[in-house]
Amino acid sequence: MEAGQIFVLLVVILLAIFVLVTLAKSVRIVPQARAGIVERLGRYQRTLDPGLTVVVPFIDRVLPLLDLREQVVSFPPQPVITQDNLVVSIDTVIYYQVNDPKAATYEIANYIQGIEQLTVTTLRNVIGGMDLERTLTSREEINNALRGVLDDATGKWGIRVNRVELKAIDPPPSIQDSMEKQMRADRDKRAAILNAEGVRQSQILTAEGQKQSAILTAEGDKQSLVLRAEAEKAAQILRADGEAKAIGAVFDAIHRGNPDQKLLAYQYLQMMPEIAKGDSNKVWIVPSEFGKALEGLGDAVGRFGSGFAPGAIPPDDHAAEAVEAAAQEAAAEGEAAAAAAAEEVRRALEAAEVASNPSKPMPSEADVSNHGDDDQVSGDGASGDEHGPAGNGAAGTGPALGRDLTEDPGDEPPSTPPPAPPAPPAG
């Protein structure tokens, strides 16, 4: 091949390469969310939008593409002094976005470094006016202060700071230990308070429960005592009614039987051992009327026997009337003594019953007087039925049955002894 042909071939190849390079430099593809700055002959010419773009090769120069998306930058911990002269280490995180590629390219050389230094200086200014407690509890206030200062400063850079966050605030180790102790003491205090409140509430509830229980128990005891008293009252009423009926039946039977003085004296003698059997009977009193009754009864029997003994019959009617009067007087004295003895027996029985049953009330003086009156009436009736006209002598002893037996029998006027019967004629 000739030299001329080879030269032509080399020129064609160089031309082809030049065309390809020129085409490559003139056609640019910008991705989405990216922006490119075109400089023509070293001067800003335009901003490339996402898509296919043609530039003039060897005249226009496309600078490195800028990312228009929001970006996150974490700065290393920065030592900051608080108002109370404590050094704390603070980590910050910046969320920013490029909204003007031309300003971000020509207004500042390195906007990332500018944002970092601006954040550090602003953070020191803000934290310097706060103490440690406020610094630890005022994150939102610090974030807003930083974002306001960064927005004012980075606005002309074509950058918008969306958020500023404090990632960590680390006080010195000694301060951390003190804070932990304080927190532990505070929590122990709250735990003790809660425990004391729980114990107090438990004691209050327990006391209220015991109070309610005591009230219910007292009400139950009250109702029980009331019911028991009502039952005892009804039982005493029924018992008294039965005893009254039994006493009435006994007195009716006695009145119908019309007993004499001998039977009453015999019954009294039989009742004395029963009276002496009671455990509460420490002293046993024998009524004085009993001895008088027996003495009078013996005198009357003696007089009657001596007056009507064989060979001693009174010669006239006057002596017989005197003997009969003496016999009637002796019978009246015996009847009065028997009635007094019966009253003493009744009182002794009632005292023994009261001693064995303290709930039963003692009989009043009115009851004793009424019983005396009943005995008086019954004595009058019996004497009237038995002796007929001679009952007036027995009725004369009625006041003795109704009197108070505690009086001294010596105050009564002595009865006039009957005249002695005349001596029988000699031979």
Image (cartoon, rainbow, N blue to C red):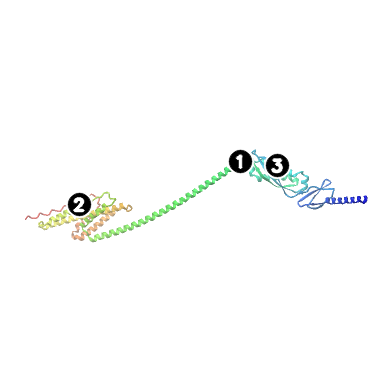
Q: Check the image and name the residue furthest to the top.
A: 85
CB under 8 Å between callouts 3 and 1? no
Q: Which residue is mark 2?
A: 292
3 or 2: tag closer to the N-terminus: 3
Cα–Cα gap, marks 1 and 2: 116 Å
Percent of width and height locating residue 290: 21, 52
Cα–Cα gap, marks 3 and 1: 27 Å
CB under 8 Å between callouts 3 and 2? no
Q: Which mark is residue 177?
A: 1
Residue type highlighted by circle 3: Val
Image quadrant holding the C terminus, namely bottom left
Residue type highlighted by circle 2: Lys
Percent of width and height locating residue 296: 18, 53
Residue at x 55% of width, y 45% of height: 191
Looking at the image, residue 204 sits to the left or right of residue 243; the answer is: right
Q: Check the image and name the residue furthest to the front.
A: 1
- Between 47 and 365, the one lying in front of the other is 47
Q: Secondary structure at mark 2?
A: helix
- Between 136 and 32, the one lying in front of the other is 32
- Name the image quarter holding residue 246: bottom left
Residue type highlighted by circle 1: Asp
Q: Which residue is mark 3?
A: 120
Looking at the image, residue 303 sits to the left or right of residue 162; the answer is: left
Which callout, 3 or 2, points to the residue nearer the camera? 3
Percent of width and height locating residue 349: 27, 54
